[in-house]
Amino acid sequence: MLPMPIADLHAIARELAASGRRVHVMWQRPESLAFVARGREYRSEFHVNPSDEIMYMIKGEMNLHYRTPEGKEEIAVLKEGCTIYTAAGIPHSPRFPPDAFLLVIERQRRAGEIDAFHWFCPACDHPLHEERFVVADYATDPVSGAYRAFYESEAHRTCAACGHVMPRPESFR
């Protein structure tokens, strides 16, 4: 029989809320990866994904910050029950609270593909830091790994242009 998983998105959201985990991977196949994400109150970076993404807001509302080709930050609001397509290579930052849940469908990474995470100074918008990962298994929660590396280093959070130090959020301590 072909693998044809059925997932109860609301049950997965309840399980994530109860467990405190941020991600529940439903499946990972070479051309299809699907997971439910719980919001992160501290999210501020822009993710550059080598794959297209389809995002569906299961519960709550999300502000999807993204950067235009000119580098300008814009925001698309995704309300509960709505979906958005984000093409590969668009720097984007899905910002939603921990009591909101998002379904993400994309493809598994191909050999050698790199996910990048970019932070910008909140005071002057100068680039602060970049984390790069080869993501072989999305269940390892690469976003949390990027944040650990960023917030554990004051040097990563200090702007070379204006000297502003991006604070480490209380919720991440």
Image: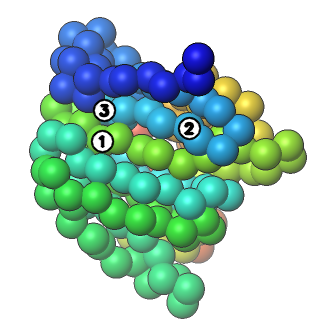
Q: Are marks 3 and 2 in contact (CB under 8 Å)?
A: no
Name which quarter of the figure residue 141 lies in. Answer: top right
Q: Residue at x 22, y 11 (%)?
A: 18
Q: Are marks 2 and 1 in contact (CB under 8 Å)?
A: no
Q: Secondary structure at mark 2?
A: strand
What is the spatial separation of the Cα atoms under label 3 and label 2, in whole angstroms? Answer: 16 Å
Q: Residue at x 37, y 32 (%)?
A: 36
Q: Secondary structure at mark 1?
A: strand
Closer to the camera, 43 or 12?
A: 12
Residue for badge 3: 38
Q: Secondary structure at mark 3?
A: strand
Disc on res. 102: 1
Q: Residue at x 59, y 23 (%)?
A: 2
Q: Quadrant of the N terminus?
A: top right
Q: Residue at x 21, y 66 (%)?
A: 77
User: Going from the N terminus, do you reach mark 3 or mark 2 first?
Assistant: 2
Amino acid type at circle 3 is: Arg
User: Going from the N terminus, do you reach mark 2 or mark 1 first?
Assistant: 2
The residue positioned farthest toward the right in the image shown: 112
Q: Is residue 87 above or below residue 147?
A: below
